Image (tube, rainbow, N blue to C red):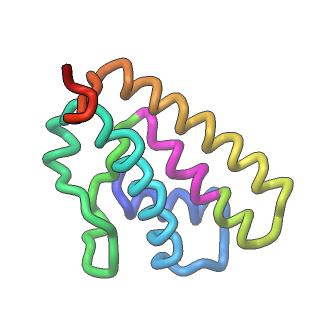
Amino acid sequence: MTVNELITMVGELKPNQFEDNVLIGWLNTVEGKLMNEVFCMREEDERITALDYSKYDEKTSMDTELLAPDPYTDLYKYYLFSMIDFTNEEMDRYTNSMLMFNNSWQEFVNYWYRTHGTVLTERFKV
C-alpha cells in the first residue's frame, strides 16, 4: 500500500476535515513505532531495507510504499481512524478504532516475530 492509497481510502471510509499533512504526521507516528518497536528488534529484512525509510513530508512521493506489507496494512487505516476520532472528541468511536488498531498491530507483530529472528545486542551476546 502506498501513502496515497492510504490517504484516499481513509478519506473515503471516514470523511474528515483534516489536511493530508495532518494524516501524514499521524502516519509518521505509526511508521516510527514500527521501526523502533518491531523492525529494529529483529533480523534485517530486504524489503524494509530497500524501502529506505525516512519520515514522510511534503517532498515525499505519495507513491511511496508503506513499511507494513499486505495483508497487514489495516493497522494504518485503524490508527488514522483512531486519531481522527480522538481529535474530534468522539470517544466511543476512538475506543473502537483503537481496539481495531491494537488487534491489527498485534497480528502484524506476531507475524513479524514468527518470520524474523531476534537481533542480539552486545549486552546480551554470550
Q: Main secondary structure of the magenta part?
A: helix
Relative height, residue 88 to residue 13 (above, below): below
Spot occupied by residue 14 in the image (x, y as percentages of width and height):
66, 61
Relative height, residue 36 to residue 62 (above, below): above
The answer to whether residue 54 is left or right of residue 95 is left
Spot occupied by residue 126 in the image (x, y as percentages of width and height):
19, 19
Relative height, residue 125 to residue 32 (above, below): above
Residue 74 belongs to the span the image colors magenta? yes
Based on the displayed image, in which of its 4 quarters is residue 13 positioned?
bottom right
Spot occupied by residue 5 in the image (x, y as percentages of width and height):
41, 57
Spot occupied by residue 46 in the image (x, y as percentages of width and height):
15, 37
The answer to whether residue 30 is left or right of residue 102 is left
Q: 82 or 119: nearer the eye? A: 119
Q: 57 or 42: nearer the eye? A: 42
Relative height, residue 60 to residue 114 (above, below): below
**x 19%, y 51%: residue:** 51
Q: 40 or 71: nearer the eye? A: 40
Marker count (numbered): 0
Q: State the residue lying farthest toward the right.
A: 92
**x 33%, y 69%: residue:** 56
Residue 92 belongs to the span the image colors magenta? no
**x 21%, y 25%: residue:** 125
The answer to whether residue 37 is left or right of residue 12 is left
Q: 12 or 72: nearer the eye? A: 72
Start-end of magenta stretch: 71-81
**x 50%, y 51%: residue:** 76
